[in-house]
Image: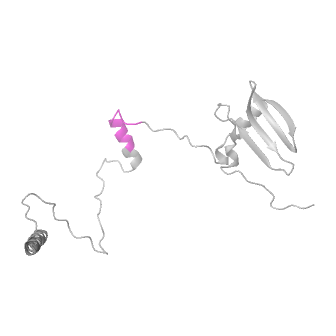
Amino acid sequence: MRTVSRFVLLSIVLASGFAIAAPPTSTGKGKAELPPPPGINDPGVSTPPAAQGAPATPDEVLATDSDADPLAPIAKPDTRIVRDKSTRDNAATAQRMAASEHTTKQQGDDTVDEYRQNGKVWMIHIVSPQGQESTFMDATGSGRLARDPQQGPVAPVYFSLYDWN
């Protein structure tokens, strides 16, 4: 029995080896032959020159596409937070501050200026004894006060590592 099992095992191994080593005999359509990769100094693909009357810039392409397709999506307005000091309208803020009720409080060592319109606080200006200023505004009308975008995206952190008198 031992010799027969060795013979069967050997024939199975040889048959599977021949099946793996044999080239594929598929008669169906295979993948098309791919061209060789370009050379290192090959100039690459060149684009044909634009035809007369064809739009030259991507903006013109978008404009002509949206004119032709009535279901094209409409361009969305820029809704980013204003972080640039030069684009902020200081005159409008000053005018709104002048029309608001102004209250000054002392909280601890800090001086807090509150500006209210219709009974709602829309801006708080805090000045510490060291001269550090923070402004929080309700720019959206939701009642939530956030840092003034004119002061930039990062709030400075002031703390003392070691202090002696």
Seen at 85% across and 52% down, the residue is 130
User: Measured along the vertical axis of the image, is residue 157 above or below residue 77?
Assistant: below
Seen at 74% across and 36% down, the residue is 123
Task: Pick the quarter of the image with the N terminus.
Answer: bottom left
Seen at 66% across and 42% down, the residue is 88
Q: Nearer the viewer, residue 153 or 88?
A: 153
Seen at 20% across and 67% down, the residue is 35
Asked whether the viewer can see residue 66, the reply is: yes
Q: How many marks?
A: 0
Q: Position of residue 150 (x, y in %)?
A: 69, 45
Q: Is residue 95 left or right of residue 4?
A: right
Asked whether the viewer can see residue 95, the reply is: no
Q: Is residue 93 left or right of residue 80?
A: right
User: Measured along the vertical axis of the image, is residue 33 above or below residue 64?
Assistant: below
- In the current view of this chain or complex, which residue is farthest to the front? 1
Kindly indicate the quadrant of the structure image that contains residue 20: bottom left
Task: Pick the quarter of the image with the C terminus.
Answer: bottom right
- In the current view of this chain or complex, which residue is farthest to the right? 165
| Picture colour scheme | one colour
- In the current view of this chain or complex, which residue is farthest to the top? 118
Kindly indicate the quadrant of the structure image that contains residue 30: bottom left
Q: Nearer the viewer, residue 20 or 113?
A: 20
**Membership of 152 in magenta stretch:** no
Q: Position of residue 127 (x, y in %)?
A: 82, 45
Q: Is residue 44 left or right of residue 16?
A: right
Q: Position of residue 78 (x, y in %)?
A: 53, 41
- In the image, the segment drawn in magenta is 62-73
Q: Position of residue 65 (x, y in %)?
A: 34, 40
User: Measured along the vertical axis of the image, is residue 137 above or below residue 129?
Assistant: above
